[in-house]
Amino acid sequence: MSAPAASENEVTGIIGESVLLSCDLKSSTAIDTARLRFHWQDESERVLYSFDKGEENQHQDSLYTNRTKAFRSEMSSGNMSIKLSQVTLEDKQNVYRAFATLFGENDKHNHPCRTTLLVAARFPTPSVTVNKTNMNSTCSTQGGYPRPMVTWTIQDRGNRTLDPWEVQTNITPDSESGLYSVWSQVNITENQTVTCHIFNPVLRETVSNTTIVSPSKSINTDPAGDVQKGFTPINITPIIITIVIIPVLILFSIGGYFVYKKRCGASGGTIKVEGNNHQRNGHVETELLDRCSRASDNLEAD
């Protein structure tokens, strides 16, 4: 196995996730792992992972217990990479080095690899709200790392980025987790579209959210980025009154009709005229109407 110059690279790990620390010996022949020894250590010389002729982690520091894993099936081809899991804020800017030794009939051969680890956490899509009373818009998010850059753009007659003096921004780290919270506010006018941008300098990614301010309503986007349309409240009291009163009046009218029918219509068509042995329709109808009229008068009197 030859000894090429140390390979160097830079990787980014997301807090709480895993990251690959790569190292390839680039051997032209298969490596006998029974004669292989290699280990990874941080800049404080704490051992992340060790492999000694088939035995793993005999010299591992407690800080990395259950956090590292090698690819044993690929070691014979020269892959000395390891996976570091559960990345923490304490891992940031750490420089990790790998050293490998192959024992044989000749001299020992060492091959160092060097990896610098950057640490980051993604910011959730910010929440953007509008206060129509004070005519301002507020942007907020939390749980990201490192400290972000906050910018606002406004579109009315054109599209422009607000100057720092036009924006009030407060970015603070959490005392326990070290992750950042963002609060930012700008003044607004009607008929504007305002957008808040949160830029993560390590991940080089931006999360944004937009609100549209109009004279009658505002359209705000929620933390998930979906648009929720605003609405104008409607006074529904007259509608409710109409819906309730009309059926009551109808029921009252129907009830009155059946009472009237029962009181003066039950004998309809059976009234006999004195002095005659037969019924005369005309007279009967007149008599019936007179009786109903008198019944109606009596009801009112009662």
Image (cartoon, helix red, strand yellow):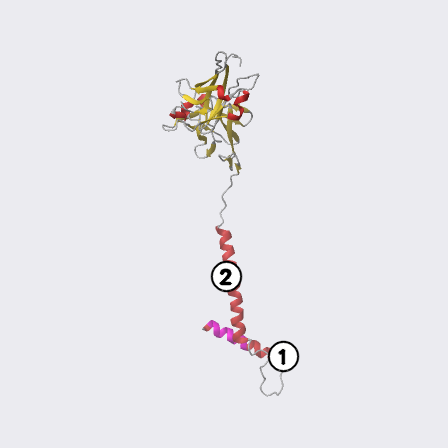
Whole-percent x, y for residue 70 in the image: 48, 25
Residue neighbourhood size for the residue with mark 2, other residues' Cα within 10 Å, grouped as few (<14), some (14–19), many (≥20): few
Res. 248 mark: 2
* Tag 1 residue: 282
* Res 167 quadrant in image: top left
- Locate residue 186, reporting x and y percent: 45, 27
Majority SS type along the magenta span: helix
Tag in front: 1 or 2: 2
Residue at the location (49% across, 52% down)? 238
The residue drawn where x is 57% and y is 76% is 289
Residue at 51% in and 71% down:
259
SS at mark 2 in the image: helix
Whether 47 is drawn above or below 212: the answer is: above
Magenta highlight range? 291-300
Q: Nearer the viewer, residue 42 or 116?
A: 42
Dot label at residue 54: none
Helix, strand or loop for disc 1: helix
Residue name at image x 49 percent, y 53 percent: 240
The three-letter code of the residue at mark 1 reads: Gly
Specify few, some or many for label 1: CA neighbours under 10 Å numbering under 14, 14-19, or 20 or more: few
Within the magenta stretch, is there residue 299? yes
Residue 82 painted magenta: no
Residue 117 vs residue 32, the one in the foreground = 32
Is 189 in front, or is 93? Answer: 93
Q: Disc 2 marks which amino acid?
A: Val
**Quadrant (top left/top right/bottom left/bottom right) for the C terminus:** bottom left
Q: Quadrant of residue 269?
A: bottom right
Q: CA distance from mark 1 to mark 2?
A: 38 Å
Label 1 or label 2, whichever comes before in sequence order:
2
